[in-house]
Every structure is written in C-alpha cells, then in structure tokens.
Image: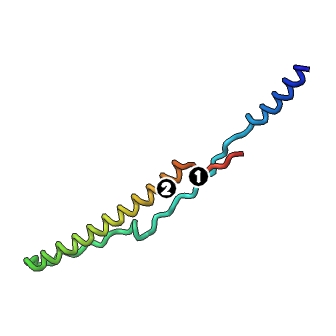
Amino acid sequence: MIALVGLCLLSVLSGCVSTRTVYVPAPAVQLSTELTADTPVPAVPDPLTWGASLDLNTHLLSALGQCNADKAEIRRVELKRASLVAGNKNHIDK
C-alpha cells in the first residue's frame, strides 16, 4: 500500500520537472537613418575674416550640438534595448 502511494506521488512530482524554458530571439530595434547619417561639415570661407570666423564657429557649434543630440538618442535606444533583455521579456516557458 505504501509503495502504491509512493509511486503515485512520484509520478505527480515528475510532472513538474519536465518544464523547459525556450528563448525566442527578439527583433533588434533599428536606429533611424537620421541618427546614423553624416553630420554636414560647414565650409571654411576662403578669406577667413573675423566675422566669417564667428559665423564658422556658430555653424560648428550647431553641428556639434546635433551630434551630441544624436548620440544621446542612440544611448536612450540602447538603454531601452538593454532593459528589455535584462527584464527577460523575450522568453516563453513551456
């Protein structure tokens, strides 16, 4: 009688062991072409006068600001991608 109860409990417990985790690959988030496009380089005027150098500095600082904004957006996308991977939101238990 005890052996019959033991076999019954053993078969019930062995049913819990057969679960497995299957990982499904998550699609990679594509970066927009605006973020990866080349930043236009302003042309240096041929007679570089004082006023022209001030305009050139303004254009260069504007280009640098755009580059920094693009890098910040890429970091935000990468952090979002890393948080999705760390959160294990791309697996299914079977």
Task: Give the percent coordinates (x, y) of residue 62.
Answer: 25, 72
Which amino acid type is shown beneath numbered disc 1? Lys
**Image-based side of 64 in relation to 88, left or right:** left
Identified at 17% across, 75% down, the residue is: 56
Which residue extends farthest left?
Answer: 50
The scheme the figure's colours follow is rainbow
Task: Give the percent coordinates (x, y) of residue 15.
Answer: 79, 35
Task: Give the percent coordinates (x, y) of residue 60.
Answer: 22, 71
Badge 2 vs badge 1, beta-carbon distance below 8 Å: no
In terms of depth relative to the viewer, which is nearer, 89 or 28?
Answer: 89
Identified at 7% across, 77% down, the residue is: 50
Report the number of numbered marks: 2
In terms of depth relative to the viewer, which is nearer, 74 or 12?
Answer: 12
Mark 2 vs mark 1: in front? 1
In terms of depth relative to the viewer, which is nearer, 1 or 87?
Answer: 1
Q: Badge 2 is on which residue?
A: 81
Q: Secondary structure at mark 1?
A: loop
Q: Is residue 67 above or below residue 12?
A: below
**Image-based side of 5 in relation to 69, left or right:** right
Q: Is residue 17 above or below residue 55?
A: above
Is the residue marked by circle 2 packed among few (<14), some (14-19), or many (20+) residues within 10 Å? some
In terms of depth relative to the viewer, which is nearer, 92 or 44?
Answer: 92
Identified at 78% across, 31% down, the residue is: 13
Q: Secondary structure at mark 2?
A: helix
Image quadrant in which you'd find residue 17: top right
Which residue extends farthest right?
Answer: 1
Which one is earlier in the sequence, the residue at label 2 or at label 1? 2
- Residue 89 badge: 1
Task: Give the percent coordinates (x, y) of residue 30.
Answer: 50, 63
Give how far apart the Cα atoms at labels 2 and 1 are. Answer: 11 Å
Which amino acid type is shown beneath numbered disc 2? Arg
